[in-house]
Image (tube, rainbow, N blue to C red):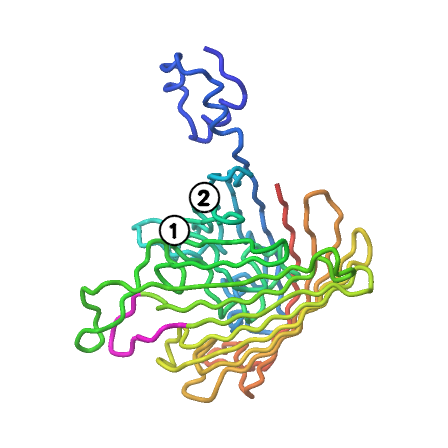
Amino acid sequence: MKFNKWTLALAAGGVVSLGSIALAEEKPMSQVLTAVSSTTLSGYVDTSAIWKFGTGNASFPGRAYDGLGKVDGFNLNVVELQLEKPLSEEQWAAGYRVQMLLGQDANGFNVSPFGGGSGAGSDFSLKDAYVALRVPAGNGIDFKVGSFSTVIGYESFESYLNPNYSRSFGWQLEPTQHTGILGTYKITDAVSFSAGIANTWGAGINARANRPTGPGGANVAVESEKTYMASISITAPESWGFLKDSAWYFGVIDGLAGNTSGATANSTDTTSVYAGGSLHTPVEGLSVGGSFDYRFNGPNAVTVGDNWAYAVAGYLSFQASEKWKFNLRGDYTEGSDGTFYNRAGLNQNRLGALTVTADYALWQNVISRAELRWDHSMSGDAPYGGTVNAAGAVTGLQHNAVTLALNIIYKF
């Protein structure tokens, strides 16, 4: 029996079995192709090179993914593969999305309780992995059932979607992933609303959240608690002139961060409040944006209980030409001790940063950009590392960290 190239490709990827197809000759091949014809394959390969000026490459409080041993060298950040069948225009449409992460940035992104699965210490993880469903109520409600990205945040895990290569401080304060159900309803062409229920505030496929109730704060066999979320987005219509496609976003998430135990366990809910948006200006190619994150009682091993943290960021983006684009970000964060690092009982963590990124489109399907970032401790301490001398003591502790990064991404 002869097989076409599409069938052979599916067999090579383990999607179908040639043996089963050969034995089921009575089933027309067209039915098999119909089942997969609407599925798309996409993804990207993300690489970087980062250098820190001065000494001490280990400590970067408040910076996601930069502290994973990446400084002073070349890196494969992550490879993402996505299989998706988007929802059609049908009233009872159904589809799915599966995003697989491979590489260092996948480490611990969506921790799984399955032994040997996508967990902390593994360079394999899942991002979105859900069934998509539409219910024809009103304008139609679109549901995601499974593991889906959080509903708040200005920036995304996919760095190529962000104005800058490095993430803001606000990214560190937000959850990344939830396992549950999320419904989205488009009220008008300009306004949409989302609401959902998940197992936990933080990431963890099939994780459960139990409030410590036993002696000494130990967990007992009680019903797990759930996390609740809601968001609203507003997009400026064409009638708003130069403001067309400007967008504003508001969201809130409340629930237990995870299954905690022990006498010092944080048994209170974690609440995240977010507001952000982007605004087009009358100047062609120029847009501005801003974001605000506030988190109550988030994950913190130092200040347990009533800890807090907030972050603000401002964004400036200018498309200078067809190929050149420049992005500027200034952000500040403040939180109780232990939010980003341990000050040994001293006051809050206070950090500021200024980031400039230049993006030049040289190759097709390739994002190539360079970034210069300056981090500064506003607390009067020096958290950015130093040099270990012969006696094992750290000297030359730094109040600042200046880094230069090159980011090359291929999208397919």
- Secondary structure mostly taken by the magenta-highlighted segment of the chain: loop
Label 1: few (<14), some (14–19) or many (≥20) C-alpha neighbours in 10 Å? many
Q: Which mark is residue 133?
A: 2
Q: Position of residue 55 (x, y in %)?
A: 58, 74
Residue at the farthest front position: 138
Q: Position of residue 305 (x, y in %)?
A: 35, 80
On whether residue 317 falls in the magenta region, the answer is no
Along the polypeptide, which appears first: circle 2 or circle 1? 1
Q: Position of residue 149 (x, y in %)?
A: 48, 56
Give the labeled residue for mark 1: 118
Q: Is residue 52 above or below residue 333?
A: above
Q: Which mark is residue 249?
A: none
Q: What are the residue bounds of the magenta stretch?
A: 259-270
Label 2 amino acid? Leu
Real-space Cα separation, disc 2 to disc 1, in angstroms: 26 Å
Compared across the picture, whether 119 is left or right of 170 comes to: left
Circle 2 sits in a helix, a strand or a loop, which is it? strand
Circle 1 sits in a helix, a strand or a loop, which is it? loop
- Residue at image position (59%, 82%) is 399
- Residue at image position (53%, 40%) is 86
> To which quarter of the image does residue 169 belong?
bottom right
